[in-house]
Amino acid sequence: MAGIVPPFTHESALKKVKAAQNLWNTRNPEKVVQAYTDDSIWRNRDQFMRGHKEIVAFLTKKWEKENGYKLRKDLFAFTDNKIAVQFFYEWYAVKPDGGKQWYRTYGLEDWTFGPDGKMQKRHMSGNDVAITEEQRWFKEGVDVDSLTIGPEHL
């Protein structure tokens, strides 16, 4: 992801977004954090963090809670060194009876990049919506990029 550097074109911004999507879908905090500057600033919903140590701790806790995590990111807008992304991801929480409660998270992110292509700032706003197994989009074997998402969700 860091190899794609600003100023962005439409093509390079698209590549950056999909590289981020693929990286996050690894669910490996130590791998994901390498795409961010050492002092990267994050806001994720109501949580604020700075730097690799805090980001790794956040992602570790996130993916301990969000089981079955599968993400799609789509380019929303871009400028020279900034990208805005619309995203969707699905995950489940384990219920007290051992069953699964699925959720779809809808959100927007704004990213700012340094000259080396690493992200200096990431701000995320998102909402979780409880869904049933039948309502899931990102079931096993589904290519998240080939799925058509209707206008009621965009």
Image (spheres, helix red, strand yellow):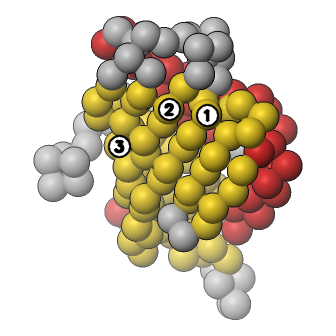
Q: Amino acid at mark 3?
A: Gln
Task: Tell me if residue 97 comes above or below residue 142 in the rendering.
Answer: below
Task: Tell me if residue 56 comes above or below residue 62 in the rendering.
Answer: above
Task: Tell me if residue 104 comes above or below residue 77 in the rendering.
Answer: below
Q: Secondary structure at mark 2?
A: strand
Characterize the local packing of mark 2: few (<14), some (14-19) or many (20 or more) Cα atoms within 10 angstroms. many
Residue at x-position 40% and y-position 67%: 127
Label 1: which residue? Answer: 120
Measuring from the top left, give residue 4's x and y in whole percent.
Answer: 56, 11
Residue at x-position 42% and y-position 61%: 126
**N-terminal of the two: label 1 or label 3?**
3
Which of the image's four quarters has the N terminus?
Answer: top right
In the picture, measured across the screen, residue 1 lies left or right of residue 90, that is right
Distance from Cα at disc 1 to Cα at disc 2: 6 Å
Residue 31 sits in quarter? top right
Q: Residue extending furthest left? A: 151
Residue 93 sits in quarter? bottom right
Give the number of callouts.
3
Towards the viewer: 149 or 13: 13
In the picture, measured across the screen, residue 3 lies left or right of residue 154, that is right
Select label 2 or label 3 by which is in front.
Answer: 2
Measuring from the top left, give residue 43's x and y in whole percent.
Answer: 56, 56
Select label 1 or label 3 by which is in front.
Answer: 1
Residue at x-position 69% and y-position 90%: 97
**N-terminal of the two: label 2 or label 3?**
3
Q: Are marks 1 and 2 in contact (CB under 8 Å)?
A: yes
Q: Amino acid at mark 1?
A: Gln
Label 2: which residue? Answer: 112
Label 3: which residue? Answer: 86
